[in-house]
Image (cartoon, rainbow, N blue to C red):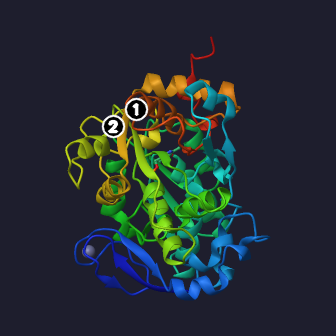
Amino acid sequence: MNVTHLECALCGLKHEAHRLLNLCRECGKPLLVRYDLDRAKQSLTKESLIGRRPDLWRYREVLPVEDDANIVTLGEGWTPLLHADRLGKAVGVAELYIKDEGQNPTQSFKARGMATAVSMAKELGAEKLAVPSAGNAAGALAADAARAGLECFIFMPRDTPLANVVECEQTGAHVTLMDGLITDCGAEVARRKEAEGWFDVSTLKEPYRVEGKKTLGYELAEQLNWELPDVIIYPTGGGTGLIGMWKAFDEMQQMGWIGSKRPRMVTVQATGCAPIVRAFQEGKRFADEFPNAATTASGLRVPKAIGDFLILDALKESGGTAVAVTDDELIEATKEIGASEGIFCAPEGAACLPALRKLLSTADVKTTERVVLFNTGSGVKYMESFAGGSS
Ligand SMILES: Cc1ncc(COP(=O)(O)O)c(C=O)c1O
Ligand SMILES: [Zn+2]
C-alpha cells in the first residue's frame, strides 16, 4: 500500500513502518503514519469515491493496512452529517450540522480508531491487546478484537458507565475495574504489558487509532462537497478525533482536494476536567495534569493527554479556541438536542451545544457561519448520567 514510514509528531524522527511500535524511541511522543500521497491520489480521487463501500474503508489508499484480508470491520464510519434545522433556529445559526457518531458500531466514534488499530495489530502479529479506557474505546476494542479472534484486556475506572462494562464482558474481553482515573488504568497497562505480552493500544500510544479517526475529516469534506465548515466543535479527551481530522485536512490539501483554508477547531471540555482549556488559556503547548478530575461525561475525564501538544497546536494554527462547560449545562443540552433533533447524544457530544452558545455570545462564532458539532457517541450508554431526569 502507500505507507512510507512512521514519524514522531514532536521530534520528527522517522521510524520503520510495518513493525509493532508504540511511541517514539527517542522522545517518547506519539508516532504518526506517513503516506506517499502522490501515489495514493492516482487511484483515490474525489470521483473514485462515488459508489465505494459506505464505511471508513472507502478511503483505502490513505489507510495503513497492507493486506485486505487483515481488515477487521463491523461497518465503522460513513455516519450521517445531519442538518440541525430546529436546533439551528433556536441558537440562531442556519448552517448548523451534527455529525452523528452515535450511529457507529458500538455506538461511538471510538469504533473508527479501533477498526484500524485492531486491523493493524492483526496484520503485524499481535495476539493480546490491552487498553485503558473511559468506556467507549473499550467497547469498540472488545468488539473488534472478538471479530479478529484476538484476546483483549481492558482496564476502566470502577465508575465507568455500566453499559460499557457489560458490553465488554458480553463481547469476550477480560475486564478489570480500577479505583482511580483512566491515567491510573494506563499506568497499570504500562506496568504489566511486558510480562503479559500485551500490545498497548492506548490513545496515541500506538500509531493507528488516529488513522481511523482521521476518516472523520475525509467524511466531513466529502459530505459537504469538499468545502470544509467554518467551525468544528469537538468534545476533547485524549484528542485523537481532533488530531486525526487535522491530519486528514493536511493530507487532502497535499492531494489537491482542498485549499489551505481550515475550519476553526474548538475543543470542548467539562469544567471538572479541563486541562486543554487551561493550557490554551495560559498559552502553553503542553498541558499540566488536571487535579481531581470529575465529570459525568466520562469520555472527557482525561486529566492528562499524551497528544496535548498536537491538540493545542491545531487549536492555535486554526484560529480556534477551547471552552469548558459545566455538567449541568451538558446534561441539559442532551435533552435539548434530543427534543429538537431526535438525536440522543452522549453527554460529551451534547457539551458542544453550550460551548457554541458561549462562542456566539462572545462573537467568536458568527450566526452566518457553517458550524459542525460532533456528537461522538450515543446517550444510550449513559443511563447513570440521566437517572432522575425523567420529570
Ligand atoms: C463519547 C465520547 N466523546 C468524546 C471522547 C473524547 O475523545 P478523544 O479521546 O478522542 O478526545 C470520548 C472518549 O472516551 C468519548 O467516549
Ligand atoms: Zn520523537
- Callout 1 secondary element: loop
Q: Is residue 1 visible?
A: no
Residue at 23% in and 78% down: 26
Is there a contact, CB below 8 Å, between mark 1 and mark 2? yes
CA distance for labels 1 and 2: 7 Å
Determine which quarter of the picture holds residue 216: bottom right
Circle 2 Cα neighbour tier, 10 Å, few/some/many (<14 / 14–19 / ≥20)? many
Residue at 70% in and 50% down: 80
Residue that numbered label 2 is attached to: 273
Determine which quarter of the picture holds residue 260: bottom left
Give the mark, 1 or 2, whose residue is nearer the N terminus: 2
- The residue type indicated by label 2 comes to Cys
Q: Nearer the viewer, residue 57 or 154?
A: 57
Q: Residue 295 got which mark?
A: 1
Q: Is residue 182 above or below residue 189?
A: above
- Callout 2 secondary element: loop
